[in-house]
Image (cartoon, helix red, strand yellow):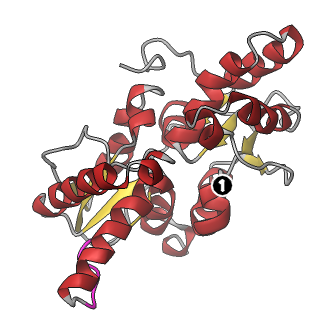
């Protein structure tokens, strides 16, 4: 069980301001998810601040056994979020790195440790923030659909927020969340794990894709782009090998899914 749960973490009232840590994958490959995160928060009356100097959280180096390199990347992030505002992260994986592992990286440096602890206390995974801080409730204006939800290992086991994505989807009246057989299993991505152990990773994601398809879902939703890209990539490869031109398992980040279902274009 993760160390952060609704029972143990104290959540602040909804703030007037918040930072966005967009993550590398959102910045480079899924900017729409970042923009939709901003739209969701701004519609709730929260001014979103985006320090442009932000880069990677340092997790790839850290999980690959290079703490010095991870420390150099993480140290830069410590200097960026100077105001005492929440830092919203649209990824359980990156949020877990910043919340739980930054203090470990700087354990031997009292000054930087204090900064790391102070920052870690302000780190919130997006769906956690929407549910427990914002109190997100919006009318579902989309057509009926059935989706499957994939929750990343870090969101589930380190951040303890496996339920928040599901809670947001459950509040959408026309959305049915399909039950998948392997909901708690890893998709096999694991950052550099997929590179270092490609055969194992491929077997894991093949099982995950099968589980998602067997659920009867029309698409998959996730709050973590790494997992989402891994799952969608495997499904797309299967489509290619089978000669299918239409995606058998489309998907999107939950920020985009929520905005599309409840966005301002439906309220005009």
**Location of the C terminus (image quadrant):** bottom right
Residue 156 in the image, given as x and y percentages of width and height:
38, 32
At horizontal 40% and vertical 53% (from top left) the residue drawn is: 222
Is residue 121 found left or right of 268 in the rendered image? right
> In terms of secondary structure, what is the magenta stretch mainly?
loop
Q: Nearer the viewer, residue 162 or 94?
A: 94
Is residue 53 found left or right of 98 in the rendered image? right
Residue 240 in the image, given as x and y percentages of width and height:
28, 84
Q: Nearer the viewer, residue 9 or 25?
A: 25
Residue 78 in the image, given as x and y percentages of width and height:
82, 31
At horizontal 25% and vertical 37% (from top left) the residue drawn is: 184
Q: How many marks?
A: 1
Q: Is residue 186 above or below residue 172?
A: above
For disc 1, the neighbor class at 10 Å (few under 14, some 14 to 19, many from 20) is some
* Quarter of the image where one finds residue 29: bottom right
Q: Is residue 25 above or below residue 124?
A: below
Residue 131 in the image, given as x and y percentages of width and height:
47, 36
Q: Secondary structure at mark 1?
A: helix
At horizontal 78% and vertical 39% (from top left) the residue drawn is: 73
**Location of the N terminus (image quadrant):** top left
Magenta stretch encompasses residue 204: no
For the record, the magenta segment spans 245-249
At horizontal 36% and vertical 58% (from top left) the residue drawn is: 221
Is residue 89 found left or right of 250 in the rendered image? right
* Quarter of the image where one finds residue 14: top right
Residue 13 shows up from this direction: no
Q: Nearer the viewer, residue 95 or 14?
A: 95
Residue 248 shows up from this direction: yes
Q: Nearer the viewer, residue 27 or 203?
A: 203
According to the picture, the residue beneath numbered tag 1 turns out to be 24
* Quarter of the image where one finds residue 250: bottom left
Q: Is residue 79 above or below residue 5?
A: below
């Amino acid at each position: 069980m993760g160390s952060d749960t609704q029972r143990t973490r104290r959540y602040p009232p909804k703030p007037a301001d918040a930072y966005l840590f967009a993550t590398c994958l959102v910045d480079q490959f899924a900017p729409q998810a970042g923009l939709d995160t901003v739209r969701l928060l701004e519609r709730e009356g929260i001014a979103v601040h985006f320090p442009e100097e932000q880069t990677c959280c340092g997790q790839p180096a850290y999980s690959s056994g290079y703490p010095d390199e991870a420390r150099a990347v993480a140290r830069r992030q410590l200097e960026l979020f100077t105001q005492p505002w929440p830092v919203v992260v649209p990824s359980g994986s990156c949020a877990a790195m910043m919340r739980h592992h930054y203090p470990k990286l700087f354990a031997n440096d009292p000054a930087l440790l204090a900064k790391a602890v102070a920052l870690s206390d302000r780190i919130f995974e997006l769906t956690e923030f929407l549910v427990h801080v914002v109190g997100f409730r919006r009318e579902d204006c989309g057509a009926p659909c059935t989706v499957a939800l994939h929750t990343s290992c870090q969101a589930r086991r380190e951040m303890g927020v496996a339920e928040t994505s599901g809670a947001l989807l459950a509040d959408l009246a026309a959305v049915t969340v399909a039950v998948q057989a392997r909901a708690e299993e890893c998709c096999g991505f694991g950052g550099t794990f997929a590179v270092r152990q490609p055969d194992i990773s491929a077997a894991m994601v093949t099982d995950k894709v099968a589980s998602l398809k067997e659920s009867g879902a029309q698409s998959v939703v996730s709050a973590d782009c790494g997992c989402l890209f891994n799952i969608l990539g495997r499904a797309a490869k299967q489509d290619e090998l089978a000669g299918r031109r239409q995606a058998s398992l489309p998907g999107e980040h939950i920020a985009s899914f929520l905005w599309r279902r409840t966005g301002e274009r439906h309220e005009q």
